[in-house]
Image (cartoon, rainbow, N blue to C red):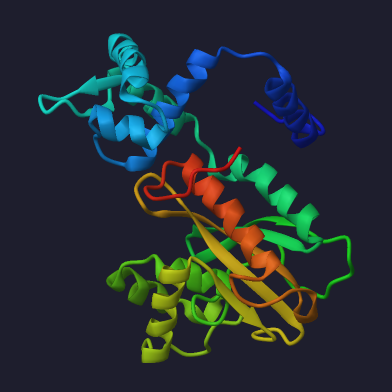
Amino acid sequence: MQSEPNSTANDAAAGSDVKAQRGISALESTGELLVSLAGASQPLGLRDLAAAAGMPPAKAFPHLVSLQKIGLLSRDEDGCFSAGPLGFELGLVALQRMSPTRDAEPEIASLAATTQLTVAAAALGPLGPTIIRLEESARPQHISLRIGTVMSLVNTSIGRVFAAHMEEDALERWQSHESIRLAGAQAEQPLSRAYRERLNRIRENGIDESFDAPVPGVGTVAAPVLDHTGGISLVIAVIGSSASFDAGPQGPVGLALLAATQRLSWRFGASGAATPAG
């Protein structure tokens, strides 16, 4: 189904209407238990699950019994709760309908509006990390980036984020085509120790940045969007003049980018992704 014009604004208005409407408080309590169990990533007993949801076990138990009856939860012989048949079925339906490019669109538009910088999304194509979406800043910027541009795995932050999530043998295979990519090395070179250490930092921090290289005067911060398998679906990057934003994950732009990619990773089922607030 194609999005209608102003879908982002319409979705925001719809979300506000839902929050303003009167709900059923008992169901909201049930939802707190489900959110707590999903956040635990392992089966939980009654007391632990109730504590995680911030309610007494006596209050939590009737909710859990009902969730068992309708199949959203199951309970093992040790008394621990986990997803039930209906829970799995709903999860599979959500995964089948998931489209990383489509689902990332509101986050990309919002990030561009918030930062007033260019936002790009890249996927791994036949030749390497490829730009598939570009929300350009209203500010004049000299960025030689277009839909279809293939990024270096070594010399660009977008490419390095992809590289950080590749298996060693796959990374070495991808390196053989490095010379055809934007800012790619002109000849095949072995992976240096410094490069491997940088990939380790990207995995630890969840973000990478490049300032004044490979393009003088241009800065980029990039972060991954992971899926339910732990694999990388997209890399989203914020791009602007080097003087436009602070480097590193703790600057305002870096924090906004990490928040957006973590929300998307959570939506795509990535284990350990932060649950979005609100």
Residue displayed at 79% across by 80% down: 243
Q: Note whether residue 182 is visible.
A: no
Q: Note whether residue 87 is visible.
A: yes
Q: Residue 125 in the image: x percent, y percent?
A: 50, 59
Q: Residue 267 in the image: x percent, y percent?
A: 50, 40
Q: Quadrant of the N terminus?
A: top right
Q: Residue 242 in the image: x percent, y percent?
A: 75, 80
Query: 6 left or right of 68?
Result: right
Q: Residue furthest left?
A: 77
Q: Residue 104 in the image: x percent, y percent?
A: 61, 45
Q: Quadrant location of residue 245?
A: bottom right
Residue displayed at 37% across by 18% down: 59
Query: 40 left or right of 138?
Result: left
Residue displayed at 68% across by 21% down: 18
Instruction: Answer above or below: position of 60 versus 139.
Output: above
Of 26 and 72, nearer the camera is 26
Residue displayed at 65% across by 86% down: 213
Of 6 and 252, nearer the camera is 252
Q: Quadrant of the C terminus?
A: top right
Q: Quadrant location of residue 249?
A: bottom right
Of 75 and 171, nearer the camera is 75
Query: 137 left or right of 204?
Result: right
Q: How many marks?
A: 0
